[in-house]
Image: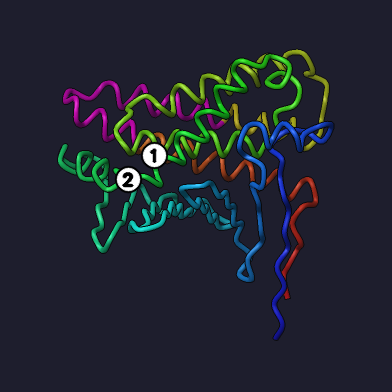
């Protein structure tokens, strides 16, 4: 049986003049493929890293791999259960609710490397570019950019930045809220995606509030990290629906 691969190349902003903008931001070449087993695979390559994110099209199970030369790759898995698994060089740390603080420290240690730092730096630069460019942020940001920004923020939170996802979702929430208020009558794939993302954001707010009521600092940090994983999984589910709505994915790969 012959297998085929369906490929899209995203500039991360809407079509007009976007190739130059993507190159200037350092994010040109962000690619998506549909794998033979009907999963969505996203890749981004930089000078010092290769980022891969694979998400099951019919669930929220996700695997993130960040690799670099001369160092073991980091593999992050989440979305299948209420846990996060981080693997590097044969060492695996799995975080569940109520786990002790050494789990958080061990996970952060696994993400200590040049490739992860380079990935965070490149996507962080792109996020700052959007924040400083009102026109781009208000009119041209493409839905695929949101998931990449949130993924990088999630990686940063795993690496020890406890509020990384909250900061990024706050930027996205403000942008989407203003846009939906200005065009409440519209119904299209992008608007439906943004509505789903806002609903997911509301669920995340409830999760974070519950986490913040825990007594121990480490319990709160662990619970907030699991909230971040659930939030990202929900955002990736909304992205998958956007891909389907836009007709970007084949019904089935033979």
**Residue drawn at (81%, 34%) of the image:** 188
Q: Would you identify the image quadrant in which residue 216 lies?
A: top left
Are there few (<14), some (14-19), or many (20+) residues within 10 Å of tag 1? some
Judged from the image, the secondary structure of the residue bearing numbered disc 1 is: helix
The CA distance from mark 2 to mark 1 is 6 Å
Above/below status of 192 relative to 41: above
**Residue drawn at (34%, 48%) of the image:** 84
**Residue drawn at (71%, 18%) of the image:** 138
Above/below status of 123 relative to 75: above
Q: How is the image coloured?
A: rainbow
User: Is residue 114 one of those drawn in magenta?
Assistant: no
Q: Position of residue 67 (x, y in %)?
A: 42, 55
Magenta-drawn segment: 200-225
Q: Position of residue 92 (x, y in %)?
A: 26, 57
Nearer-the-camera pick, 100 or 17? 17
Above/below status of 50 relative to 146: below
Circle 1 residue? 117
Q: Would you identify the image quadrant in which residue 87 lies?
A: bottom left
Picture mark count? 2
What numbered label is drawn on residue 113?
A: 2
Asked if labels 1 and 2 touch by Cβ distance under 8 angstroms, the answer is yes
**Residue drawn at (62%, 41%) of the image:** 238
Are there few (<14), some (14-19), or many (20+) residues within 10 Å of tag 2? some
């Amino acid at each position: 049986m012959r297998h085929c691969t369906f490929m899209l190349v995203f500039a991360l902003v809407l079509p007009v003049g976007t190739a130059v903008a993507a190159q200037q931001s350092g994010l040109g070449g962000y690619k998506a493929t549909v794998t033979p087993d009907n999963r969505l695979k996203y890749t981004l390559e930089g000078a010092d890293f290769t980022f891969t994110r694979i998400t099951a099209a019919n669930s929220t199970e996700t695997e993130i791999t960040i690799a670099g030369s001369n160092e073991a790759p980091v593999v992050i898995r989440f979305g299948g259960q209420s846990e996060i698994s981080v693997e590097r060089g044969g060492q695996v740390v799995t975080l569940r609710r109520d786990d002790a603080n050494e789990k958080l420290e061990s996970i952060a240690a696994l993400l200590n490397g040049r490739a992860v730092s380079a990935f965070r730096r490149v996507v962080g630069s792109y996020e700052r570019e959007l924040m400083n460019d009102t026109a781009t942020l208000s009119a041209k940001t493409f839905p695929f950019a949101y998931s990449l920004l949130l993924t990088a923020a999630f990686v940063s939170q795993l690496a020890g930045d406890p509020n990384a996802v909250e900061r990024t979702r706050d930027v996205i929430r403000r942008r989407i809220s203003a846009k939906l208020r200005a065009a409440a009558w519209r119904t299209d794939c992008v608007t439906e995606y943004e509505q789903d993302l806002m609903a997911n954001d509301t669920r995340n707010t409830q999760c974070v509030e519950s986490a913040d009521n825990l007594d121990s600092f480490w319990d709160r940090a662990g619970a907030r990290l699991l909230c971040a994983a659930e939030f990202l999984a929900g955002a990736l589910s909304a992205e998958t629906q956007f891909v389907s709505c836009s007709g970007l994915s084949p019904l089935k790969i033979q």
